[in-house]
Image (cartoon, helix red, strand yellow):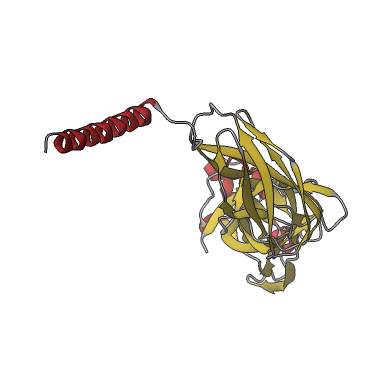
Amino acid sequence: MVMIPIVSADDEPENTKEFLPPNYAFSTNYYNSYGEPDIYASLLGDYEFERGETAQIRITLANKGVLYGFKSDTSVGTDTANHSLSLKELQYETMRTTAVGIKAELISTSPYIEVDPSASIRVMKKLAPGKLPDNPLVYGITISDHAPAGAYYLQLPVSYEYQSQVRMTTNEVYRLGVAGLDHTTHYKSASKTLIIPIFVKGASEFEITDVSGYLTAGSFGVINVTYKNIGEIPARDAVVRVVVMKPLVIEQSVLRLGTVESGESKTVSFKATADRNSLVKDYGVDSEIKYIDENGNTAFSENLKVTVPLKPSPDKLGAGTMALGGVFVLGIFMIIKLILNIEKYK
């Protein structure tokens, strides 16, 4: 800890740090006080969040610091003036457990939780024991779409200063040109890391684990798609909705999956066709799963892309293929003609 001397003429030490303090020759310490701030944090409102959610969390700080007592450092004897100064110092010493100049920074150690960097640091002027701040500390967080369900622990390093000693000034302080200065205040720096627990809710989450089949230009084909629930919660009454664009045409766009338990895979098959003159390539087909979540609400998966290969029609020959076939037929004809001519002249 670092001791910082500050002068003050009232009971608001955080407002007086622009003064340069006189040295100990111009002040007297009548009492030493014991105790310091003890900062705690609490999360206000809901601590549960969903994957993909961007939210604000509100944190309130509380000071549970205890002033344990005082010990005399300088005897006042029967001097009434010194006795009066010592009593006034006792009043100032009671502020020892008040934290001033508080800075609190919210930090996430998980790659699945992001703290808004533009508002990750908050400050407070002071926090006295037994008093709650007028406003909580507000931070923004974003939960990853792929965050595993469970507890996460955010860190809140808090730094502050607290009064470590008060010294009453003597009349000699007027030599320094400082009027109305009755005491100096000395501070120590302190820090503490608080833990803020939050919880990411479990949910159904789907991925495509296998695709088989292909389409042939000008005819129907069957595409088999396997979906797996990689989430923690079963998806009830699930159906798959498939969306295709030209030149593909699907026979049935909604297919039933039923209830899909956590870790379970189910396969659906859809029939589709493509125009005879369609470009031969792999086509992307959008699919989405609609289901009932654990709260009885309708929910939707993210878009799941299905890659569908389109192959040429067997009876559709390109110009190159036809030319090659013509050369082959002509070659056979020439060979046969040559054989017949040889037989003729034997």
Q: Is residue 165 visible?
A: no
Q: Residue at x 72, y 60 (%)?
A: 199
* Residue 98 percent across, percent down from the top left: 71, 58
Q: Residue at x 81, y 60 (%)?
A: 130
Extreme-left residue of the structure: 346
* Left-right relation of 297 to 71: right
Q: Is residue 310 visible?
A: yes
Could you tell me which quadrant the C terminus lies in?
A: top left
* Left-right relation of 24 to 85: left
Relative height, residue 344 to residue 142 (above, below): above
Q: How many marks?
A: 0
Relative height, residue 70 to residue 325 (above, below): below
* Residue 135 percent across, percent down from the top left: 78, 46
* Residue 324 percent across, percent down from the top left: 31, 31
Residue 159 sits in quarter = bottom right
* Residue 261 percent across, percent down from the top left: 75, 64
Q: Residue at x 67, y 43 (%)?
A: 271
* Left-right relation of 231 to 305: right
Residue in the foreground of this view, choosing between 120 and 245: 245
Extreme-right residue of the structure: 296
Q: Residue at x 34, y 28 (%)?
A: 320
